[in-house]
Structures are given as C-alpha cells and as structure tokens.
Image (cartoon, rainbow, N blue to C red):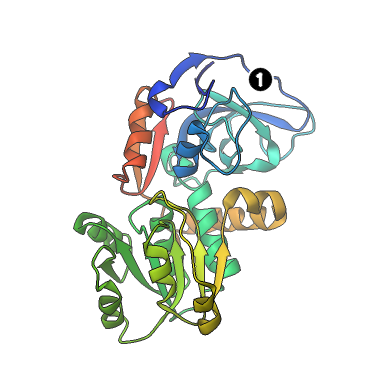
Amino acid sequence: MKAVLVEQFSPVQSLRIQDVPTSDLPRGRVRVRIKAAGIGFVDGLKVQGLYQTRDPLPFVPGMEFAGVVDEIGEAVSRVAVADRVFGLASRGALAEEIVVPENELFRIPENLSFVQSAAIPVNYLTATYGLRERAALRGGEILLVLGAAGGTGTAAIKVGKSLGAHVIAAASSEEKRSFACSQGADAAIDYTLENWRETLKSLTQGRAVNVVFDAVGGEISPVAFRTLAWKGQHLVVGFAAGKIPALPFNIALLKGASLTGVDSAQIRKFEPDVYDRLMQDVCVALERKSLEPPPTHTFSFANFQEAFQTMSARRARGKIVVEVAD
C-alpha cells in the first residue's frame, strides 16, 4: 500500500509517499480503507521528533482517519465489512489503509462525508472533554477561545455555544476573526494588540472570563489566565505559537483558578470509558444537527507536504484534512 513514511525525524519536506507492506489482521482488529485523514500540530511535531514522546521509527504519521471497513478479524462485532467509519489511532492515518482495534472505530453519521468525519476525532473530543467534563461550562458563562480559527478553536466555539456559553473568539487577523464569528462566536478580539484585555472587558460588560480554551500558548497564555474570574479554568490544549509559556503561581492563588491539561491521546489511554461515551455523544449530536460538522481545509494525498506547511504557518481556517482516496 501507499503511505507517508517517517524513516528519520526531519522536516516534512523530506518525507515521501512510499510503498509499505500491509499489516496482518490479528483477533479483534479491523482493516479500514482510508478515504481521508485529519492532521494537527501534534502530527507536525511528531514527524520532526519534537513532540513530548517519540514514535518508534519507522512510522506512518497521522492519527485521525475516516474510511470504509475492508476486512474484520476474529471476534469483531462492533463493525462490519463496508461500514463507513472514523477513528483515532496513535499513528498510521496518512496511508491507504490502517489496522486498528474495533473499539477505536465509530460509524460515520449518514449526513457526514469522509472529509468531515476525518476532522472530528481530536477536535471534538478535545473540545467536548475540556469544556463539558473538565470545566463544566454552563449556560451564560463566558468562554474565551484562543486560536479560534483553527480546528480545535472552531470546535470549541461550536461546543461552547451548544452548552449555552457566551463565546469570545481571539485570533490574530481580521480574516481569522471574521471566520470565527461565522462559526458561531458571539464576538471576536485581536489578542496581538497591547490593550486587548480592555477590549475584552468592554465586550463582556466588565465580567471576567469563566473558561479559557487555549490552543495557542506562547506569550498570550499568561495574559489570558489573568482574565479569569474567581474559580475560573484555563484549559491547556496545545502550543500553536511554538513556545510553552510559564505562569506565576501567585496568579492562580489570587484567583482561585485552575490550569487544566486536555490531551485527547491521554483521555483515550486513561479514561477509555469516558472517551467512548463522549465520541458516541458527538456522533449523536452531529446526526441530530445540534452540533455542526467542523469546517475543513482540504489537500490531496500527493500534496500532503503543503497540508503540513499550511498548518505550521497557521494559515488554515478550520481542520486540515488530506483526501487519501476518492
């Protein structure tokens, strides 16, 4: 089969689509013919060996995928051959096929395409787990979304609105802010301006923020933490700015506020029952249209390098998806 293969940690420009052997099909596993694969900042870091953990070489990058069940192993009962499915794996999605445990697969709602489905797992799991399970975001509370035009940011806007929050989108350009508002944000601010906290106060009529959803990191994060109300929560989702910030602990003390990590891979590892429940809930919400499918920025399989470069430059609007097959 054809796959993007990482043989040594290096910039994405050095990667190529290669012929690799197909995998065996052990008991309880499913072979999926991939139609589309979602990629995110974690994937970009992994291919360079810059993520907190390193995948064993060689490996095929990409964690999110959507496709058709091609073959099932013994004792598989959750899916059948020809089912349309999507899922989240530890690696292997930028390929023509993938073999995964059956409990990592979910049926695609009838109203969604493969491209839309490949954009779901990390973004919607992260947003739903962070805002609903960890922050317990409630109707009428104020949610500040940093990096609001990206994949996780747009998911946070949609999940936040579904929970009844007042959503403020923070983004670095007028185009991104307009896009975030088109996805449901109630208002938007430019966090690159020196006085952006004053603008935020005017948008909230002086109320402090209850939850910060932070996929950006860098210099903006400590400033955003200071906008929190008493017992507010700052959800750490990622570091798109490239720099991991530091926070003076006295600010957390004075605000009674919490810094909470939200990592989709860790949810699946440490809370598999919660992971399964949340993904099922997301599927139901998408089917009932109480959640809208995430916006996508698509690339062909042959142009996977451009997809990574667009993501690294933070030029994408919504989730980046590579169409592996028609």
Q: Quadrant of residue 54?
A: top right
Comparing 287 with 250, the one in front is 250
Closer to the camera, 280 or 109? 280
Q: Amino acid at mark 1?
A: Ser
The answer to whether any part of residue 70 appears in the image is yes
- In this rendering, the answer to whether 288 lies above or below 79 is below
Q: Residue at x 48, y 52 (%)?
A: 123
Residue 245 locus on image (x, y percent): 46, 59
**Quarter that holds the C terminus:** top left
Quadrant position of residue 216: bottom left
Task: Give the residue displayed 24% in from the left and 74% down from the top.
Answer: 195
Count of marks overlaid on the render: 1
Q: Residues within 10 Å of mark 1 (few under 14, many from 20)?
A: few
Instruction: Indicate left or right for 34 with 72 as reference.
Output: left
Mark yes or no: residue 161 visible: no
Residue 226 on image: x %, y %: 42, 76
Q: Which residue is denoted by mark 1 in the rendering?
A: 23
Q: Position of residue 181 (x, y in %)?
A: 28, 63
Tell me the quarter of the picture where residue 183 sits. Answer: bottom left
Which quadrant, please, contains the N terminus? top right
Front residue of 72/185: it is 185
- Front residue of 39/289: it is 39
Q: 5 above or below 77?
A: above
* Left or right: residue 155 compared with residue 204: right
Percent of width and height locating residue 194: 24, 69
